Image (cartoon, rainbow, N blue to C red):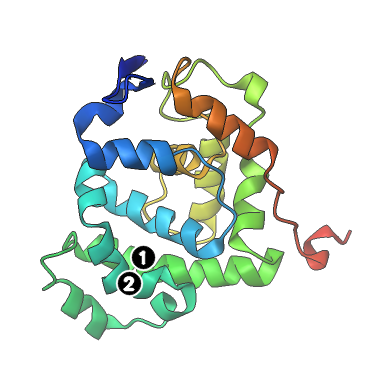
Amino acid sequence: MSGTMIAPDGRPRCHWCAIGPDMLAYHDREWGFPVGDDRLLFEKFCLEGFQSGLSWRTILTKRENFRAAFHGFDIARVAAMTDADIGRLLQNEGIIRNRAKIAAAINNAKRAQDLIGEVGSLAAYVWRFEPAAENLPPPQTITTSPESIALSKDLKKRGWAFVGPTTVFAMMQALGLVNDHAHGCVTRDAVAAARAGFRLPALSRVEKSP
């Protein structure tokens, strides 16, 4: 469990964000706040995949480069990328030049399109796996959960890549499905309030039909 540290403004934050101002800003403004926008959800899927085996700060410092390389993570535009694009991106020093991860981003965009066609939105699918808050252990004590395992298994069955249970749990933390801010962290209550006011994305009528 990470506990808290006192940030430069004199208020407690999760200890991990003490690495630098970029991490502090990410912690305060983004990590854990609920996301219902498909483009932002897809961006998180991709960046968490690229993070595999690396640090999040490495990804965060390259984030704008990733956005430029992958058309702002527009799902349709990424799905239309080709082998020639993979070759081009392997020469791009501003991103993580890993062929398997680049190919996975393109593949996952196509699989995201399939999901959107099935249930109406990527958000509607992902939020079905939100765990009950009362069933969660203390913050930052686990790296997987039954829900992340179930989501990972279902995504893999659908053909997604780089979506192991640990990667998926990190995504769930980032997207607000899990409020993993430490107790005492000033952002924990802000995230809880944002979740309370968040309207869950609706499934399509086709998905709801018997």
Q: Please tell me the numbered disc located at residue 7.
A: none
Q: In which quarter of the image is residue 11?
A: top left
The residue sitting at 54% across, 40% down in the picture is: 176
Ranked by sequence position, the earlier of labels 2 and 1 is 2
Give the residue number, with chain letter if any, for mark 1: 105
Task: Classify 10 Å Cα crowding around label 2: few (below 14), some (14-19), many (20 and above).
Answer: many
Q: Which of 107 and 10 is in front in this view?
A: 10
Picture quadrant where residue 4 is located: top left
Q: Which of 145 and 94 is in front in this view?
A: 94
- Residue 53 visible, this angle: no
Where residue 118 appears, as percent x and y from the top left, is 68, 68
Q: How far apart are marks 2 and 1 (CA)?
A: 9 Å
Name the element at disc 2: loop
Residue at screen point 37% across, 15% down: 1
Q: Mark 2 points at which residue?
A: 70
Residue drawn at the location 41% of the way across and 22% of the way down: 140
Report the front residue among 164 and 190: 190
Disc 2 and disc 1 in contact, CB within 8 angstroms: yes
The amino acid beneath tag 2 is Phe
Q: What element carries label 1?
A: helix
Above or below — where is 200 with respect to 28?
below
Residue at left offset 61%, top offset 39%: 194
Where, quadrant-wise, is the C terminus in this rendering?
Answer: bottom right
The spot of residue 16 in percent (x, y) is 29, 26
What amino acid type is highlighted by mark number 1?
Ala
Q: Where is residue 200 in the image (x, y as percent from the top left)?
A: 71, 49
Left/right placement of residue 54 relative to residue 32 reads left
Q: In this view, does 7 lie to the left or right of 191?
A: left
